[in-house]
Amino acid sequence: MTHLIFDKQTERFNLLFALYKRSNANSEMSFNMRDLASQNGLGYHSFRSAYEYLVAEDLIQPRHYSGGNEGQDSYFYASMTTKGMNAVEESFKNTHQDSTYFPAYHKMMY
């Protein structure tokens, strides 16, 4: 069971970190989270679970996509919140220690 929890926490971190890098830690930049998940090897069901968690914990903020071609994927546009930025940065303050939301970065990478 703990392996499942660790895997879910790692998926959430990877999705949030992908947004952090893509947005250059800018809360005004929004991106299609489904695309980011796919680019990082996250399947749809794992993505939905991670996305819903990040929204519920206020680590990302859903945004309305105004690109003109609004399909189902427009629902998944989001930007990082300040709380989300802090959560990512906390993971790097001590890479061998678990943070509030995620396992130690060192554990997730090995």
Image (spheres, helix red, strand yellow):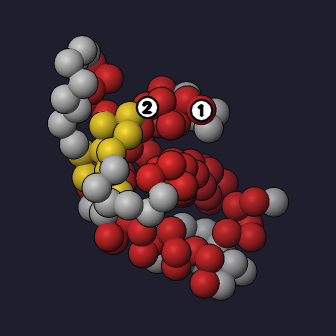
Name the residue nearer the viewer: 69 or 100: 69
Residue 9 image label:
none
Q: Secondary structure at mark 1?
A: helix
**Residue 48 screen position, x and y as percent:** 40, 35
* Residue at 32 percent of width and 23 percent of height: 73
User: Which quarter of the rendered picture does the C terminus lie within?
Assistant: bottom right
Asked whether, in this view, residue 75 is left or right of residue 37, the answer is: left
**Residue 87 screen position, x and y as percent:** 45, 71
Q: CA distance from mark 1 to mark 2?
A: 9 Å
What number of labels is visible? 2
Asked whether, in this view, residue 42 is left or right of residue 25, the answer is: right
Name the residue nearer the viewer: 63 or 10: 63
State whether residue 18 is above or below residue 104.
above
State whether residue 58 is above or below residue 41.
below
* Residue at 62 percent of width and 38 percent of height: 40
Amino acid identity at mark 1: Gln
Visible in this render: residue 26? yes
If you read the primary sequence from the N terminus, does the residue marked by circle 1 or circle 2 appear first? 2
Q: Secondary structure at mark 2?
A: helix
Asked whether, in this view, residue 71 is left or right of residue 9, the answer is: left
Which residue is denoted by mark 2 in the rendering? 34
State whether residue 13 is above or below residue 100.
above
Amino acid identity at mark 2: Arg
Which residue is denoted by mark 1 in the rendering? 39
* Residue at 50 percent of width and 49 percent of height: 22
Quarter-of-image position of residue 26: bottom left
User: Which quarter of the rendered picture does the N terminus lie within?
Assistant: bottom right
Visible in this render: residue 52? no
